[in-house]
Amino acid sequence: MNVVFDYLVNGRNTLRGMKMLVEKLKDVDLGHEPFVDFISYWLALPKTNGLPYQSDFNPADVRHLLQDITIYEMLENNTIRCRLMGTGLVEGFGWDYTDHDYLSLWAEDDRDKLLYHFKKMLEMQMGISTDLIAIAQSGFEVSGSAIWLPASDGNGKATRIIALTNEDTPKNSRDPREDKVVQVKASRISFIDFN
């Protein structure tokens, strides 16, 4: 059963009449075999207070996914610091945004929405499934999808986000070294309920 709720930031609907969708895991169309592997691995990790520790996420266990994994940290100053960016994503973006604020890649109007999504994901211990569009310097759009999963830091606080991204646009459609990604936006976002 899907649950829909109004998307509010500071008491006002900021998605122009759109609703947020919460889907049960069994109802989510993952559409990409690595996403199944990624979620299955996350589900199998030991949990404390409902979440795995990010430190229990062993890249060697999912080596075939590693190039497309990113690890983020939600900081108290409302930034989302990229702690690790997979080599496949670095290559596709044309640059490495490790240690940068992920929100800075989003249009200013969308940053509050994205921050809200990630805070809700961590608070509610849900995943996020999204369709993304990365916009290169030339205006060329690279489409893809991602699964974002919550995790705890070493102190047991839900501040970590582990993501797997899949690029749908053919790799030879642009030279990322010459045409770097400068902005990201979402065309679809839904929460994943693991209960």
Image: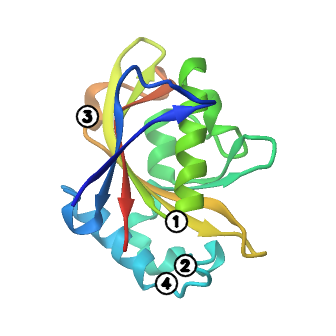
- How many residues crowd mark 1 within 10 Å: few (<14), some (14–19), many (20+)? many
Relative height, residue 94 to residue 26 (above, below): above
Instruction: Look at the numbered discs 4 and 3 and tell me whether their residues touch, using CB distance below 8 Å.
Output: no
* Residue placed most toward the observer, 22 or 164: 22
Q: Of the residues under marks 2 and 4, which one precedes in the sequence?
A: 4
Task: Report which residue position mark 1 lands on.
Answer: 125
The span from disc 2 to disc 1 (Cα, nearest Å) is 7 Å
Task: Report which residue position mark 2 lands on.
Answer: 50
The residue under the point 81% across, 41% down is 77
Q: Disc 3 vs disc 2: which is toward the camera?
A: 2
Instruction: Look at the numbered discs 2 and 1 and tell me whether their residues touch, using CB distance below 8 Å.
Output: yes
The span from disc 1 to disc 3 (Cα, nearest Å) is 31 Å
The answer to whether 89 appears left or right of 194 in the picture is right
| Mark number, residue 169 | 3
Indicate the amino acid at tag 2.
Gly
Q: Disc 1 vs disc 3: which is toward the camera?
A: 1
Q: Position of residue 27 (x, y in %)?
A: 20, 62
Q: Of the residues under marks 1 and 4, which one precedes in the sequence?
A: 4
The span from disc 1 to disc 4 (Cα, nearest Å) is 14 Å
Q: Of the residues under marks 2 and 1, which one precedes in the sequence?
A: 2
Indicate the amino acid at tag 1.
Gln
Q: Where is residue 76 in the image (x, y as percent from the top left)?
A: 80, 48
- How many residues crowd mark 3 within 10 Å: few (<14), some (14–19), many (20+)? few
Identify the secondary structure beneath mark 3.
loop
